[in-house]
Amino acid sequence: QVRQGRSGASRAAAMGSRLLEAYRTIGLVCDEVPFALTRLGRERFATVSIGKSFLVYDLDRLIVKAVAPPRLTRGDGVEPISALAALGERTFCACGSDVLEYRRAKLHRVLLDGAKHGFGS
């Protein structure tokens, strides 16, 4: 039963309306790089690029679970992320000519250093 005097949105929320339910969008906080999806047990996560760093969202709650710091490169500042992949707690990023592996949003190792292999400047 709904009490008198509530606003229309409050009444609808009390009655279980999905139409007026609060929501968030991911599209406003990521760039054009395709996102990566992964699972850890029953939890689902989306990793999205934000240019020079990435965010890991908990998809069930739509909250940010982790933020990776931007990676400084050889003398010319920070290169943007051009591709992402995720597997469990690991995130793989292509930044310029480098491929990086992160674990829980912390740099774990450089899988391919493009400058050492003649790919970068």
Image (spheres, rainbow, N blue to C red):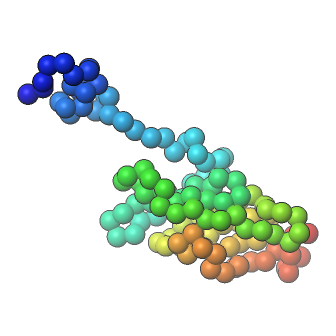
- Determine if residue 37 is in view: no
User: Which residue appears at 52% of the width and 63% of the height?
Assistant: 66
For this view, does 117 lie left or right of residue 100?
A: right
For this view, does 119 lie left or right of residue 34?
A: right
User: Which residue appears at 12% of the width and 24% of the height?
Assistant: 3
User: Which residue appears at 63% of the width and 55% of the height?
Assistant: 49
- Determine if residue 99 is in view: yes
- Write down the quadrant of residue 96 in the picture: bottom right
Report the label total: 0
User: Which residue appears at 12% of the width and 26% of the height?
Assistant: 2
Position of the C terminus, as image quadrant, is bottom right
- Write down the quadrant of residue 78 in the picture: bottom right
Up-down relation of residue 84 to residue 16 (above or below) = below
Which residue lies most toward the left here? 1
Up-down relation of residue 20 to residue 59 (above or below) = above
Which of the pair 2/16 is nearer the observer? 2
| Image coords of residue 6 (percent x, y) | 21, 22
For this view, does 10 lie left or right of residue 57?
A: left
| Image coords of residue 13 (percent x, y) | 24, 31
| Image coords of residue 18 (percent x, y) | 28, 33
Which of the pair 39/28 is nearer the observer? 28
Which residue lies most toward the front here? 5
Up-down relation of residue 19 to residue 93 (above or below) = above
Position of the N terminus, as image quadrant, is top left
For this view, does 59 lie left or right of residue 4?
A: right
- Write down the quadrant of residue 100 in the picture: bottom right
| Image coords of residue 106 (percent x, y) | 60, 73
